Amino acid sequence: MKKRDFSELNEQETLALAITLEEEDSRTYSDFAEVLQQNFPDSAKIFAEMAVQENDHRRRLLELYRSKFGDHIPYIRRSDVKGFVERESVWMMPVMNVEKFRERGAMMEIETQRFYRAAAATTTDVSIRKLLGDLAAEEELHEKTANRLESDHIPEAVAHKEKLMAKKLFLLQIVQPGLAGLMDGSVSTLAPIFAAAFSTHDSWNTFLVGLAASLGAGISMGITEAASDDGSLTGRGSPWLRGIICGLMTTAGGLGHTLPYLIPNFKIATGVAIAFVLVELLIIAWVRKRYMDTPFLSAMFQVVVGGIIVLVVGIVIGSS
């Protein structure tokens, strides 16, 4: 897509672009507020007030534009001009915690402030230069305003509550489906893979069985997780995101002890695969301790002992 250099824009086009920027930023802050309203209402107030401020900037720009150039405003977008950061639409963004929203808002303010300063330096019209300079100064103050709004709306107790909520959402939407997938992939595929290994004593055939078992388990777990609930009542977020995470982690769990069978020597491949199994089970136990507050010894017993039992079952069946 062809883009224009910022230096090529005339005063009318610069004002038109400024109006579009303020419209986009106001809408983005409103979207932030909407996304955060349910779980982080105090932070949502910050972005709602920032959206109001951007709307005021837009109004002042429109008044100046109308007095200088009339009622028709050419639609010049951020993406039409070189030098702007490409921003993903809010509805397409991955799940973010509240701090990530605040960081993105700060970056938006910095970019807009720089735009106004550069635009003010290129115009010779006194009224346009004054407004652009004023808006640059106001954008610079927005970060301080955001800090003030944060102190108004987010006292220490509320901030602590929001952090707990963010942790809860992370557990529900990311950790739980990922852990469920990793456990299923690491444990449920042990029996078929090692049964195939000890019945055939052939690395390649064992690899094919493991690959099929891992992919099949990943697809099955992903679909099951996505269909379990739509997240509207449980707060578990997008079912498709959870399904993808669960499916990928299930596949990864199975592939961990499948890939060693790419080693042609069966005995070496089996030794490496068993070592991988132990590492996978220890990782699962650590994740349960780290994110699910499960005592490490209890997690070790539940996961490692269970995994070893399934491993032994597979070896016994394959050797019979």
Image: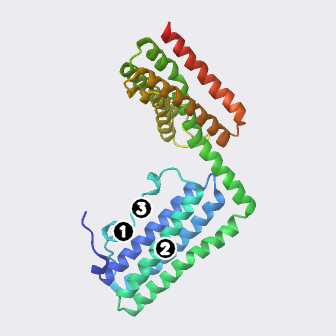
- Position of 228 relative to 68 (above/below): above
Report the residue marked by disc 3: 87
Cα distance in 3D space between marks 3 and 1: 9 Å
Tell me what residue is drawn at x 44 percent, y 17 percent: 197
Q: Nearer the viewer, mark 3 or mark 1?
A: 3
Q: Secondary structure at mark 1?
A: helix
In what quadrant of the picture does the N terminus appear? bottom left
Amino acid type at circle 1 is: Arg
Q: Secondary structure at mark 2?
A: helix
Amino acid type at circle 2 is: Ile
Of the numbered discs in the image, which one, if any, rests on residue 39?
Answer: none
Q: Nearer the viewer, residue 312 or 162?
A: 312
Task: Place residue 172 in its image quadrant.
Answer: top right
Report the residue marked by disc 1: 78
Residue 236 seen in this snapshot: no
Task: Place residue 148 in its image quadrant.
Answer: bottom right
Mark before the other along the chain sequence, 2 or 3? 3
Tell me what residue is drawn at x 46 percent, y 14 percent: 198
Tell me what residue is drawn at x 52 percent, y 50 percent: 95
Q: Residues within 10 Å of mark 3 (few under 14, many from 20)?
A: few
Report the residue marked by disc 2: 110
Q: Is residue 221 left or right of residue 305?
A: left
